[in-house]
C-alpha cells in the first residue's frame, strides 16, 4: 500500500531536520520538503540536506519578489510597525510561506502540511491560521509543538538517526528574511542585560561606523519606493541596497520587549536597516501629502494593520478592507525624501512632493505671506465660544 505524503516547511536547521525523520516514523509517510527563499538563504545546501536525511523530494521556491511587492510594501504603505518598534519581518513572511505550502501540497497530493514552529511562539498561529484560511480542509502537523523536546533531546534524536545537523556557534534563536532579522533566547532573555555585540550581523557597532554621515535620497510613487539617489531599482534590489547602506552606518537595531499573541512578554532583538529607513522616509512624505484628519486616521489604521499582521490574520477580509483604505490614502504620496544616516541614527533632513499640501506662501513669516491674519480674530471668537460659555455657567470648574 503506497504511503501518504506530508509536505514539510524546511529551513535546514535542527528542528526541521529532525522533523523529517520524525514524520516518517510517526506517520509512516513520505516526506516532501519545501524551502522558500525570502532572502538571505543559500538554497542548494539546504535542499541537499533534506535529501540526505531521507526526504522523498525537496522543493524550492524563490519568493523574494512576491514577498517584497505583495507583503512588505503594502505594510510599508500602511505604516505597520508593531507596538511602534517591530517592522514585522517574520510576521509578514509567514503568510506567504503558508500560501506556498498550501499550493505545493495540492500539487504533490499531500494529506497534510507540517512546520517546525514551537508551541509558545507566534509563528505557529500565523502558519496554522493562514493555511486554514487558504484551504479550510488542510491538516496541519506541528511536530515541535507535539513532542515538546528541548534542544538536547533533539540533538540526541538526530545523533541516533544519523541526521547531520549544521554546526551552530550561536546561542541565539534567529529568523531572517529581506525585511529583517529576529534574534531571541540565550543572554537576550534578561531584559536588563545589554545585547551582546555578537547578536548583530547586519548592523555595524557605532564605533565601527563612518565618522562622516551618509546621505540618501529615496523617491516614492504612490507610497512605494522606486528610486535610490535617482537610480531606479527593483523591489528586492532596493531593499538589499538599503540594508547594506544603513547597516554600515549602524542603523536598524531594535531592542523590544513585546507582547506575544500567546499571552507572554518576550524580549526580542531585531535588525531591519531597510525597514527603519523606509518607514521613516515614508512617514515623513505623508506629513506633506496627507491632511490632518487623514494622517490621524491613518495612525489608527496603522496600529490595527500591524496587529492584524502580527496576529496571523493576513488572509482575512478585515486585512483586505484595511488595505483598501490604505491604498486610497497613498494616491498622492509621491515625492522625494532625503535622509542622513550617522552613528546609528536615521534622520529625515528634507522632503518634497509635487502634490504636497505644504504652501510656502501660507507658512512664511517673510514677504510673500498671503495668510489673512485679520480672519483669525473671527475664527478665535467662534472657536472659543463653548469655552467662554462653560466658564460663565460653571465658574467653579475654571
Image (cartoon, rainbow, N blue to C red):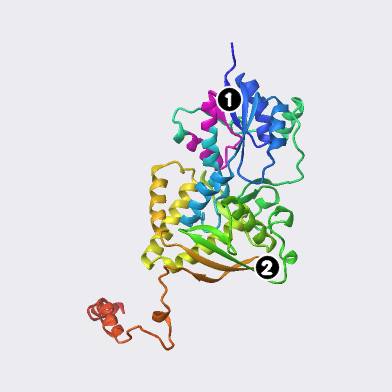
Give me the C-alpha separation between circle 2 and circle 1: 49 Å
| Residue 10 or residue 362, whichever sits in front | 362
Quarter of the picture holding the N terminus: top right
User: Between 11 and 274, which is closer to the camera in this rendering?
Assistant: 274
Q: Which residue is mark 1?
A: 6
- Please give the range of residues in magenta: 102-131
Q: Is residue 309 left or right of residue 296?
A: right
Contact? badges 2 and 1 (CB < 8 Å):
no
- The residue under the point 69% across, 57% down is 195
Q: Residue at x 48, y 57 (%)?
A: 79
**Would residue 304 appear left or right of 116 to someone viewing this image?**
left
For residue 2, which quarter of the picture?
top right
Q: Which x, y percent locates residue 380?
A: 29, 81
Tell me where residue 175 appears, x and y as whole percent. Answer: 64, 45
> What is the x, y in percent for residue 205?
72, 62
The answer to whether 147 is drawn above or below residue 281 in the figure is above
Residue pointed to by mark 2: 343
Amino acid at each position: 500500500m503506497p504511503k501518504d505524503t506530508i509536505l514539510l516547511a524546511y529551513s535546514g536547521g535542527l528542528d526541521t531536520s529532525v522533523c523529517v525523520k520524525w514524520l516518517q516514523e510517526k506517520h509512516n509517510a513520505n516526506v516532501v520538503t519545501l524551502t522558500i527563499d525570502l532572502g538571505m538563504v543559500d538554497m542548494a545546501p539546504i535542499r541537499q540536506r533534506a535529501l540526505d536525511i531521507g526526504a522523498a523530494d525537496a522543493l524550492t521556491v524563490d519568493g523574494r519578489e512576491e514577498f517584497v511587492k505583495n507583503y512588505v510594501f503594502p505594510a510599508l504603505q500602511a505604516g505597520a510597525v508593531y507596538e511602534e518598534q517591530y517592522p514585522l519581518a517574520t510576521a509578514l513572511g509567514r503568510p506567504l510561506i503558508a500560501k506556498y505550502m498550501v499550493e505545493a501540497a495540492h500539487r504533490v497530493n499531500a494529506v497534510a502540511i507540517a512546520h517546525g514552529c514551537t508551541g509558545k511562539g507566534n509563528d505557529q498561529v500565523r502558519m496554522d491560521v493562514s493555511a486554514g484560511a487558504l484551504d479550510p480542509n488542510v491538516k496541519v502537523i506541528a511536530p515541535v509543538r507535539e513532542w515538546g523536546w528541548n534542544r538536547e533531546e533533539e540533538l540526541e534524536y538526530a545523533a541516533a538517526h544519523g541526521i547531520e545537523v549544521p554546526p551552530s556557534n550561536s546561542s541565539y534563536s534567529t529568523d531572517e528574511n529581506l525585511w529583517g532579522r529576529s534574534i531571541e533566547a540565550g543572554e537576550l532573555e534578561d531584559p536588563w542585560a545589554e545585547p551582546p555585540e555578537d547578536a548583530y550581523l547586519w548592523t555595524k557597532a557605532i564605533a565601527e561606523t563612518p565618522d562622516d554621515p551618509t546621505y540618501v535620497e529615496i523617491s516614492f510613487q504612490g507610497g512605494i519606493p522606486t528610486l535610490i539617489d535617482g537610480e531606479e531599482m527593483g523591489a528586492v534590489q532596493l531593499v538589499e541596497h538599503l540594508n547594506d547602506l544603513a547597516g554600515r552606518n549602524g542603523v536598524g537595531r531594535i531592542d523590544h520587549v513585546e507582547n506575544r499573541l500567546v499571552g507572554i512578554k518576550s524580549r526580542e532583538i531585531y535588525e531591519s536597516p531597510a525597514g527603519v529607513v523606509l518607514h521613516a522616509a515614508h512617514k515623513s512624505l505623508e506629513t506633506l501629502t496627507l491632511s490632518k484628519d487623514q494622517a490621524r486616521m491613518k495612525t489608527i489604521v496603522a496600529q490595527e494593520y500591524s496587529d492584524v499582521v502580527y496576529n496571523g490574520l493576513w488572509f482575512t477580509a478585515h486585512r483586505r478592507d484595511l488595505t483598501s483604505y490604505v491604498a486610497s490614502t497613498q494616491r498622492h504620496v509621491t515625492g522625494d525624501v532625503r535622509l542622513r544616516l550617522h552613528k546609528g541614527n536615521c534622520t529625515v533632513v528634507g522632503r518634497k512632493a509635487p502634490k504636497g499640501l505644504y504652501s510656502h506662501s501660507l507658512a512664511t513669516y517673510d514677504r510673500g505671506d498671503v495668510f489673512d491674519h485679520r480672519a483669525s480674530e473671527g475664527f478665535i471668537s467662534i472657536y472659543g465660544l463653548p469655552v467662554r460659555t462653560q466658564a460663565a455657567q460653571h465658574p467653579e470648574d475654571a
